[in-house]
């Protein structure tokens, strides 16, 4: 019985590690992520003032995309793209918050490739 509980604990720990945000300057790359019709996907990273979120993505079908964070009780989205097949850019972060890249598929669903990395403030 001990082996089974140890295996469950290790599996839970590995799942938690896989879901944790990447460290600064370590890119997160995802290829061919399926998003079902009308479903959403979000990938987040903790950022601080002056850091830069460098991102790029492309989708097989048009999707809604936003980079967003919470400020007080509001959701702020400095980048919003409706019905887009892709985008890229660098966003300078204003606050110490969790910043999330968010995609929502339309009726056709989509396959999404994305890459993002948190860059340190310029020297």
Image (tube, rainbow, N blue to C red):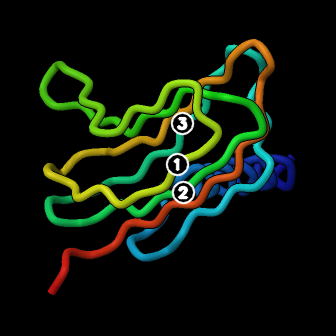
User: In the rendering, at what x and y percent does residue 78 appear?
Assistant: 27, 38
Label 1–label 2 contact, CB within 8 A? yes
Residue at numbered disc 2? 56
Q: Nearer the viewer, mark 3 or mark 1?
A: 1
Quarter of the image that includes the C terminus? bottom left
Q: Nearer the viewer, mark 3 or mark 2?
A: 2
Residue at numbered disc 1? 87
Q: Picture quarter containing residue 37?
A: top right
Q: State which tag comes first along the sequence, 3 or 2.
A: 3
Label 3 secondary element: strand
* 62 relative to 1, above or below: above
* 89 relative to 80, above or below: below
Residue at numbered disc 3? 42
Q: Which one is nearer the viewer's eye here, 16 or 46?
A: 46
Label 1 secondary element: strand
User: In the rendering, at what x and y percent does residue 64 appear?
Assistant: 54, 26
- CA gap, disc 3 to disc 1? 15 Å
């Amino acid at each position: 019985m001990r082996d089974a509980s140890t295996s469950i604990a290790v599996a839970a720990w590995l799942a938690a590690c896989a879901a944790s945000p990447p460290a600064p300057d370590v890119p997160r790359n995802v290829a061919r992520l399926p998003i079902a019709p009308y479903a959403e996907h979000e990938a987040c990273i903790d950022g601080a003032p002056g850091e830069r979120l460098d991102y790029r993505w492309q989708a097989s079908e048009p999707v809604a995309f936003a980079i967003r964070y919470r400020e007080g009780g509001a959701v702020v989205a400095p980048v919003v793209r409706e019905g887009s097949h892709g985008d890229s850019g660098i966003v300078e972060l204003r606050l110490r918050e969790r910043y999330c890249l968010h995609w929502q598929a339309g009726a056709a669903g989509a396959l999404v490739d994305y890459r993002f990395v948190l860059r340190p403030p310029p020297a």
